[in-house]
Image (cartoon, rainbow, N blue to C red):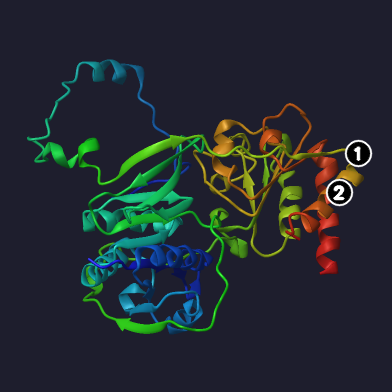
């Protein structure tokens, strides 16, 4: 067993996910403490360009695993590849992103390797014994806990996207090492037949940097239009969310639900419009960097977590805010 | 195996006669040994992870309440988002 730290870089359809760089940043800090080196594992098909994008963020080696079987993500194929490579190289720590893909993949990898997995971490450090300590929110974000993997190796953790900073790019210093695994189409039993995109290239809520959410106060599906307009004023990386009561009332589709039974998000900016802020909703967005609340009720609990609060009618404020944001955007 | 998302379909609820019938069904208990699992492999003893140091998360600092007419608050907010939060 080495002291090495590995991160699994995430890509979809030839595009690197930002969380990969965040992982390199924290991975580098951990590797300095363990005295090992930092490796990045990149899986896919015809993705050599992405290996170059990872270069210069502190990894001494980028392991590039190219196979036609790994072109599209599959739990089975990716698990096999990662497990085989971890067994061959024996890193002491293996990190991934707590993304939709990561939540599917890493529990499976951990079980195969007979080790533990700290999921959805918001901070990682190495203690005096050289063991990885992962900080995780529990009980819907009401409490925090530290978890360690005392014996089993590698120590695995999934890190929430958007929590850790993207490190500065230094001069290129990573060597790209091509690695192969014995993998064939027979290793993937659930085949992907077709990928159908939803209209308008919507980005996933968990990956949005700005989310504008509407609650019961929005009052109808048609009214959600003003929420959508504010979101699109922020441009690329913005998305529309909704509270559970808005989804249950049919104002917004279920995949937009933020909260304990919906999606847990942490964008740079979360604007809650007509959302009172139940515990279950807060559980899904309280780690957002900036929270704005627009609500008629001055007693609404959402104001307790908001950085900026406006007690007013959202139908008056939101369209005006959309105009202001557009104006500032236009100024550049 | 298929894992479904909420909203996939209408839930099917049991009818009253079926609930009554279900009460009479035998509930079979299987112990770990019969399931082929050793007690050290499951539960807290089987967990590879150990948790400690339970604590409350850091409190969020009190935010700013913006006051005035909608046109003023909207302009103030946009300005704060640009200058303080640097998000625009």
A208 is higher (above) or lower (below) than A331: above
**Chain letter behind tag 2:** B
Q: State left or right for residue B58 relative to residue A323.
A: left
**Residue located at (59% from left, 37% from top):** A282
Q: Is residue A126 left or right of residue A248?
A: left
Q: Is residue A281 above or below residue A30?
A: above
Q: Nearer the viewer, residue A278 or A25?
A: A25
Query: Does B76 sit left or right of A259 as displayed?
Result: right
Residue at numbered disc 2: B76
Name the residue at 50% across, 74% down.
A57
Quarter the N terminus of chain A occupies:
bottom left
Q: How many marks?
A: 2
Farthest residue, direction front: A128
- Mark 2 vs 1, N-terminal side: 1
| Disc assigned to residue B68 | 1
Q: Position of residue A204 (x, y in %)?
A: 55, 57
Q: Secondary structure at mark 2?
A: helix
Residue A10's spot in the image, x, y percent? 44, 67
The foreground one among A248 and B71 is B71
Q: Residue at x 33, y 61 (%)?
A: A93
* The quadrant where residue A313 appears: top right
Kindly indicate the quadrant of the structure image that contains residue A314.
top right
**As rendered, which of A229 and B8 lies closer to the eye?**
A229
Q: Quadrant of residue A145?
A: top left
Drawn side of residue A41 relative to residue A296, left or right: left
Marks 1 and 2: in contact by CB < 8 Å? yes
Q: Give the alpha-carbon distance from disc 2 to disc 1, as whole Å.
A: 10 Å
């Amino acid at each position: 067993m080495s002291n090495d730290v590995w991160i699994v870089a995430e890509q979809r359809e030839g595009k690197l996910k930002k969380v990969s760089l965040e992982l390199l940043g924290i991975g580098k800090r951990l590797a300095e403490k363990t005295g090992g080196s930092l490796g990045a594992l990149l899986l896919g098909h015809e993705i050599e360009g992405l290996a170059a994008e990872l270069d210069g963020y502190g990894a001494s080696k980028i392991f590039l695993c190219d196979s036609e079987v790994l072109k599209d993500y599959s739990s089975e194929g990716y698990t096999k590849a990662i497990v085989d490579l971890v067994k061959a190289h024996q890193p002491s720590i293996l990190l991934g992103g707590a993304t939709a893909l990561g939540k599917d993949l890493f529990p499976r990898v951990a079980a195969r390797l007979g080790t533990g997995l700290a999921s959805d971490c918001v901070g990682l450090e190495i203690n005096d014994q050289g063991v990885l300590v992962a900080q995780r929110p529990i009980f819907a974000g009401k409490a925090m806990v530290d978890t360690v993997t005392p014996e089993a190796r590698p120590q695995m953790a999934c890190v929430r996207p958007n929590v850790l900073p993207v490190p500065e790019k230094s001069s290129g210093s990573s060597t790209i090492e091509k690695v192969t695994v014995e993998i064939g189409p027979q290793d993937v039993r659930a085949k992907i037949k077709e990928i159908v995109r939803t209209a308008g290239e919507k980005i996933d809520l968990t990956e949005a940097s700005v989310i504008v959410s509407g609650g019961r106060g929005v009052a109808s599906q048609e009214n959600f239009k003003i929420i959508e307009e504010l979101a699109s004023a922020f441009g690329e990386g913005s998305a529309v969310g909704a509270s559970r009561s808005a989804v249950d009332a049919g104002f917004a589709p279920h995949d937009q639900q933020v909260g304990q039974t919906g999606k847990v998000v942490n964008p740079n900016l979360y604007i809650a419009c007509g959302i009172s802020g139940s515990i279950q909703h807060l559980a899904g967005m309280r780690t957002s960097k900036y929270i704005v609340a627009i609500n008629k009720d001055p007693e609404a609990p959402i104001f307790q977590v908001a950085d900026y609060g406006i007690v007013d009618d959202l139908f008056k404020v939101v369209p005006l805010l959309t105009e202001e944001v557009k104006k500032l955007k236009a100024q550049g | 195996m298929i894992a479904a998302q909420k909203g996939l379909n209408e839930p099917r609820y049991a009818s009253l006669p079926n609930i009554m019938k279900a009460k009479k069904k035998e509930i079979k208990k299987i112990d770990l040994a019969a399931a082929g699992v050793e007690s050290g492999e499951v539960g807290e003893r089987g967990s590879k992870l150990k948790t400690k140091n339970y604590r409350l998360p850091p409190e969020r600092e009190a935010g700013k309440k913006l006051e005035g007419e909608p046109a003023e608050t909207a302009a103030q907010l946009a300005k704060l988002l640009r200058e303080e939060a640097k998000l625009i």
